[in-house]
Amino acid sequence: MAEIPDVSYAPTEEQELIRSTARQFLEERLGLEKVRELMMSGEGFDPVLWKEMAELGWTGLGIPEEHGGSGLSFVEMGVLLEEMGRLLTPGPFFASSVMATSAIRELATPDQQARLLPSLASGETIATVAIFEQARNWSPERPATTATRQTDGWMLQGRKRSVLNGADANFLLVTAATDDGVGVFAVDASLDGVAIDRESVLDPTRRQAEIVFDTVTVGDEARLGAADSSAGLRRVLAIATIGLAAEQVGGAQACMEMSVDYAKSRYQFGRPIGSYQAIKHRCANMLMNVEHARSVVHHAVRMIDHPAELPIAAPLAGSIASAAYVWVAGETIQVHGGIGFTWEHNAHLYLKRAKASSLLFGGPRYQRDLMGRAIGI
């Protein structure tokens, strides 16, 4: 195995500024009561809040300056995603500014990047990636959706499931089987033959959709890059897994803080419940799980630019952060007792996000299998 690159794990002033600014903005402009309101609404997110995020530069954080973005690394994106996960931020940010942006940067030609990235950086356009089709199959390499060569372009036929914010996107990056491997096509969501239906989901703060492509015709320029995109798609999913893991760390941190605060303020038999050994141990174990996940994720975001390490770092972060978030969210319910199970309490929102996120790109067992293959076992 190649030697792990020598990188710094100490946060920079810029990263700390991103964290403090994001936390202040989300607490003031979002908050969990607003999250509840948005998840029950038709759109599922606030367009005004989305515009404000774009004005802060968040939607262009990982986009090069020549295309209207900030040109920062995924380390800074990871800091932002932690803060978003901490408040269960609803909306298309992860789908558009993480997944779709990464796919374009990894797969598109320079001309295609110049055409697609500026509107994503400004937040004027929302995009998502349509990869998954069958339940329990997270591989991008053998899509059932097909793209057939036409005289003046391509014809897409197939069905995609679990498309993040599919109903919110202006265009879709669709994987399809072609004569020369897997292709990725930028498809306008308003084209004839594109049918989008919202899916019923466990986590209402993160919308998903099923999308049918019925003889949808696109031009030659719609295909990102040229030859088979399988390797690039594996890298895109690895980046998305790390981004999701950063979100999960933020959510687990919020659960731990919520539990500790409740343990200090909830009195039984004349003393706070946090003074009892059983609750102390639960909170201490939460801290260990959160810090374990955080250290792995902080390593993973720094390995994105190191191709030899990414196939190992990404599933390691995905498996550990997923398991930690689900466990910490479940323990948060236990610390809060009966009230934690009620619809009125926020603990169950985190548990739903934790469980749904753990399955988004394959559960911990699937991620460990990926890691095993990467190291040759």
Image (cartoon, rainbow, N blue to C red):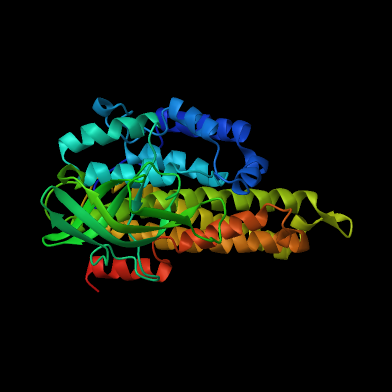
Which quarter of the figure has residue 230?
bottom left
* Image x and y of residue 214, in percent: 31, 59
Q: Which residue is depicted at the point 12% across and 62% down?
A: 179
* Image x and y of residue 261, in percent: 71, 48
* Image x and y of residue 307, in percent: 21, 51
Q: Which residue is depicted at the point 22% across and 32% down?
A: 114
Q: Which residue is depicted at the point 33% across and 56% down?
A: 314
Q: Quadrant of the N terminus?
A: bottom left
Residue in the foreground of this view, choosing between 149 and 318: 149
| Most distant residue in the right direction | 270
* Image x and y of residue 45, in percent: 54, 41
Residue in the foreground of this view, choosing between 20 and 132: 132
Residue in the foreground of this view, choosing between 88 and 225: 225
Residue 346 as seen in the image, left or right of residue 158: right
Classify 278 as above or below 94.
Answer: below
| Most distant residue in the bottom direction | 377
Residue 192 as seen in the image, left or right of residue 225: right
Q: Quadrant of the C terminus?
A: bottom left
Which quarter of the figure has residue 308?
bottom left
Residue 207 as seen in the image, left or right of residue 260: left
Asked whether residue 34 is in view, the answer is yes
Asked whether residue 285 is in view, the answer is no
